[in-house]
Image: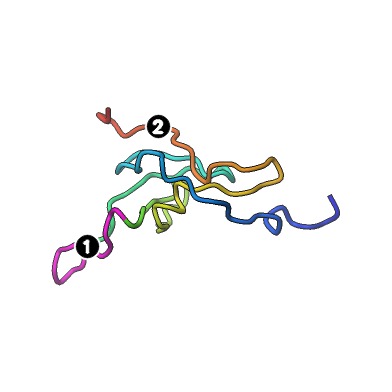
């Protein structure tokens, strides 16, 4: 390579929405290799309601440093353009226990 970062060559591509929506506690592998568990969204301390519609966003937690991230469902299920071509942003690695 010519010293250009691989990340600099990434551009979002058309989103894939035909995949099944992520379920709580499913484990996904990010295209860069990180492992994440889908978690329920946080609740508002005053109302007890979830702070974001669960059909709009996916909340997920890094398996190593436990940082919590939020991404739109469309982006979570979408693809990225890499040097290898179009790849899914996240790939289901393990279904939640008891999931069908």
In-front residue for pair 14/73: 14
Q: Position of residue 20 (x, y in %)?
A: 36, 39
Q: Which mark is residue 94?
A: 2
Image position of 68 (left or right of 30): left
Residue contact at pointers 2 and 1, CB within 8 angstroms: no
In the rendered view, tell whether residue 56 sits above or below residue 91.
below
Quarter of the rendering containing residue 3: bottom right
Residue range corresponding to the magenta coloring: 44-55
Q: Residues within 10 Å of mark 1 (few under 14, many from 20)?
A: few
Give percent across and percent down for residue 52.
28, 63
- Cα–Cα span, label 2 and label 1: 26 Å
Q: Determine which quarter of the picture holds residue 31.
A: top right
Q: State how many labels appear.
A: 2
**Looking at the rendering, in which quadrant would you find the C terminus?**
top left
Residue at image point 59% right, 41% down: 87
Q: Quadrant of residue 56?
A: bottom left
Q: Position of residue 54 (x, y in %)?
A: 28, 54
Residue at the left extreme, as displayed: 47
User: Depth check: 14 or 5 in front?
Assistant: 14
Residue most toward the right?
Answer: 2
Q: Is residue 54 left or right of residue 11?
A: left
* Mark 2 residue element: strand
For the residue pair 63 and 72, the one nearer the viewer reads as: 72
Viewed as shown, does residue 58 lie left or right of 80? left
Q: Which mark is residue 84?
A: none
User: Which residue is at a point 69% across and 40% down the rendered structure image?
Assistant: 84
**Residue 97, magenta (yes or no):** no
Q: Secondary structure at mark 1?
A: loop
- The residue shown at (45%, 50%) is 76
Residue at mark 1 = 43
């Amino acid at each position: 390579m010519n010293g250009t970062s691989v990340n600099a060559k990434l551009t979002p591509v058309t989103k894939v929405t035909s995949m099944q929506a992520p379920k709580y506690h499913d484990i996904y592998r990010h295209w860069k290799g990180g492992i994440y568990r889908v978690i329920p969204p946080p609740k508002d301390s005053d109302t007890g309601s979830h702070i974001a519609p669960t059909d709009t966003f996916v909340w997920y937690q890094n398996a190593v440093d436990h940082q919590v991230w939020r991404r739109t469902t469309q982006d979570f299920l979408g693809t990225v353009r890499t040097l290898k071509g179009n790849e899914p942003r996240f790939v289901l690695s393990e279904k939640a226990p008891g999931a069908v």
